[in-house]
Amino acid sequence: MDSSELFSRFSINRLDGEPVPDDLCILLPHRDELAERSGIRLVLDDDWAPWLDTSGLGEAVRNDPDAAANIRALSEVCRLIAFVAVDPAGQYLGYWRGPTRRKLAESPLVVLDSSSQFHLCVSSTFAEAVLERAYGHEGFPDLRGWLQSIGITIGWESPSQLTFPHEKLPPKELHRQLFERYRSSLRSE
């Protein structure tokens, strides 16, 4: 697949047709090497949404008001995220577009961890989010050097030099609010 087809497919399938961010334009052609070096895999598929799969839950769990409220809240918050990648632990990385569906270029990065908790990343680009996750691990210097060698600028030595994104309504808080609302409505039925 040539670069223009790759970028087009990724834009349509993962970014709702928005332009591919500059760092991802560099990383997409190197996605296999990125996965080898960091364990983080960029996903091109349009129907990729494993975080919404509840098929493994038993009927009793799905019928529990708290579980049902959590599943519904999780699903709604995830619809406001343009997920683009997964790590080996089953954690998903994406852009938090929020309820206003802001442009990708203005969206902070977010992780949905393996226990279905949302965490904003202390990074301004996807490449920084990948590097931030590797900080303190043995392969960090090599990953940083490789990112720089393919043309990605990294302007920090430690994530402590980065600014945590200020969000009026972060995904974790929206999930909590929706969970409470849905739990109340399910218990009153």
Image (tube, grey):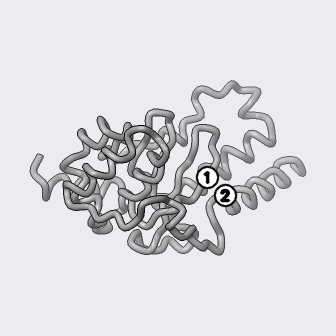
Residue at image position (74%, 57%) is: 176
Residue 42 placed where, x, y %? 33, 46
User: Residue 128 — which label?
Assistant: none
Judged from this view, the residue extending furthest toward the right is 188
Q: CA distance from mark 1 to mark 2?
A: 5 Å
Whether residue 8 is visible, yes or no, is no
Residue 7 appears at what percent x and percent y? 21, 57
Mark 1 nearby-residue class (10 Å; few <14, some 14–19, many ≥20)? many
Circle 1: element type: strand
**Relative side of 16 to 28, left or right:** right
Q: Residues within 10 Å of mark 2 (few under 14, many from 20)?
A: some
Q: Amino acid at mark 1?
A: Phe
Q: Nearer the viewer, residue 160 or 181?
A: 160
> Which of the labelled discs sits on residue 118, or is there none?
1
Q: Position of residue 189 (x, y in %)?
A: 87, 48
Residue 166 visible from this viewpoint = yes
Query: At x 25% / y 53%, what residue is drawn?
Result: 27
Going from N to C along the chain, the mark reached first, 1 or 2, is 1
Q: Amino acid at mark 2?
A: Lys
Instruction: Identify the residue at horizontal 29%, vertical 62% (top origin).
Output: 23
Instruction: Pick the residue in front: 115 or 180.
Output: 115
Please tell me how many numbered marks the rendered image carries: 2
Q: Residue at x 13, y 58 (%)?
A: 4
Above/below status of 110 relative to 35 = below
Pointers 1 and 2 in contact (C-beta within 8 Å)? yes
Q: Residue 180 versus residue 152: which sits nearer the camera?
A: 152
* Residue 65 sits in quarter: top right
Which element type, helix, strand or loop, lies under badge 2?
Answer: helix
What residue does disc 2 label? 172
